[in-house]
Image (cartoon, rainbow, N blue to C red):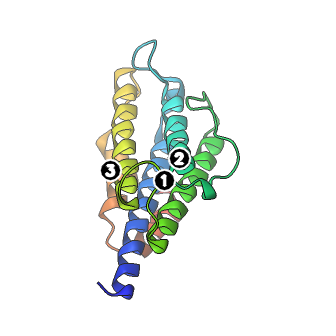
Amino acid sequence: MSRSRDAAMLETLLDSWDRNNTILLNLLRIVPEGGLEARLVPDSPSVAELFSHMSYVRLAFVYENAPELANGPLPEEYANELNRDRIARSLDESAKAVREAVRSRVESGQPLNLHYDHPIHFMQHMIWHEGYHHGQIKLTLKATGRPITDRQAGRPTWGVWMLKTREEAAAADAGRS
């Protein structure tokens, strides 16, 4: 495969990661009032704690796999942060760290330090992990009487995946549809 084709593939992969983060940020924004505190059962994480867990896992994997790109101490894994702006900043910062770790390791051809044979597997794990928790969040909200309907979630979540171009996805992110 040519270098230009490899670069295009990497940019497409990173675009997928950016879309994934946009979807999480959009989900955070449509969580109904009181929903961040919701728990499926008393000993399960709250919705807020699930968002902080995703940010933590992103950073923990960067620390383990590309420590030269780790920045500062790891946050608390299940922080009960209820400020949406702080949660969003944490998700954005951790998304950038993952993005740079994948870019760095793909471009250098250097393997990850601990997990996976290739950085793309790391990215796939992150997207799968976050999709799992996305479903948990929606189920928790539904079970606690604060459902997000498919109509409410469609455009800001699935709709982001369905956008054809990076420019459309960036516009959706900027508009926080």
Q: Nearer the viewer, mark 1 or mark 2?
A: 1
The three-letter code of the residue at mark 1 reads Asn
**Which mark is drawn over residue 20?**
none
Counting from the top left corner in percent of width and height, residue 155 is at 36, 55
Task: Determine whether 24 is above or below 166 in the image.
Answer: above
Q: Nearer the viewer, mark 3 or mark 1?
A: 1
For residue 61, side relative to residue 122 (left or right): right
Residue receiving disc 2 = 64
Q: Are marks 1 and 2 in contact (CB under 8 Å)?
A: yes
Question: Quick one: SS at disc 1?
Answer: loop
Alpha carbon of mark 2 to alpha carbon of mark 3: how far? 35 Å
Q: Nearer the viewer, residue 124 or 118?
A: 118
Looking at marks 1 and 2 on the same chain, the residue that comes earlier in the sequence is marked by 2
Q: Is residue 124 visible?
A: yes
Question: Quick one: SS at disc 3?
Answer: helix
For residue 170, side relative to residue 153 (left or right): right
Alpha carbon of mark 1 to alpha carbon of mark 2: how far? 7 Å
The three-letter code of the residue at mark 3 reads Gly
The three-letter code of the residue at mark 2 reads Glu
Residue receiving disc 3 = 154
Query: Image quadrant for the N terminus?
Result: bottom left
Image quarter of residue 60: top right
Looking at marks 3 and 1 on the same chain, the residue that comes earlier in the sequence is marked by 1
